[in-house]
Image: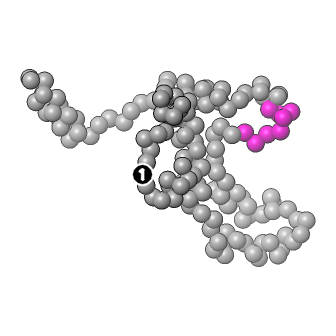
Amino acid sequence: MLQIVSSQINYSQCIGLVEMALSYSPHALVLSNELAGLVRFIQKGIKTDDDHLALDLLTKVGPGGTFLGEKHTAIHGRTEIWPNKYFKSVNYEQWEREGKEDLFNRIDKDLKRILETYQPEPLLDSFSREIYEISKKYSNE
């Protein structure tokens, strides 16, 4: 997927396909969408301007110091991390306490929510009229 995005090719026909494209999985589609988000995040690259590198802050905090209480961390701490939905960053004990939910179950739960709550955006009137005219044209044949 990273090679496809890096080459700037719009190629998404395989999303959700499994078993060498012999079958389709909505779970694989949701996972592929999540991984595509990771690839887009990687593709943005690492910002190396003065604000993002914060060399002055590195000097101020120094070896062994902590950046958690710094304003710079508060500003950049949430935007420079990939906001994934399904991959947990917890230790085994916490995972156990939270019910040992695996990747498939997290995706399954979210997929059910998506299918139950999804509301498609209405078509533009111009598209609706065009679709109506096309269907009217071919319904008489």
Residue 79: image location, x then y, percent? 63, 56
Q: In which quarter of the image is residue 84?
A: top right
Q: Is residue 5 above or below residue 48?
A: above
Q: Which residue is drawn at 57% across and 42% down?
A: 34
Q: Which residue is drawn at 60% across and 63% down?
A: 45
Considering every residue shown, the one lying at the far left of the view is 140
Q: Is residue 130 above or below residue 23?
A: below
- In this image, 66 relative to 88: left or right? right
Q: In which quarter of the image is residue 19?
A: top right
- In this image, 85 relative to 117: left or right? right
- Could you say which is closer to the camera, residue 99 or residue 19? 19
**Crowding at mark 1 (Cα within 10 Å: few <14, some 14-19, many 20+):** few
SS label for mark 1: loop
- In this image, 110 relative to 126: left or right? right
For disc 1, the marked residue is 10
Q: Is residue 107 above or below residue 60?
A: above
Count of numbered circles in the view: 1
Is residue 114 in sight in this rendering? no
Which range is magenta?
88-95
Magenta residue check for 127: no
| Amino acid marked by disc 1 | Asn
Q: Residue at x 80, y 32 (%)?
A: 95
- Could you say which is closer to the camera, residue 17 or residue 122? 17
- Could you say which is closer to the camera, residue 114 or residue 5? 5
Residue 81: image location, x then y, percent? 67, 54
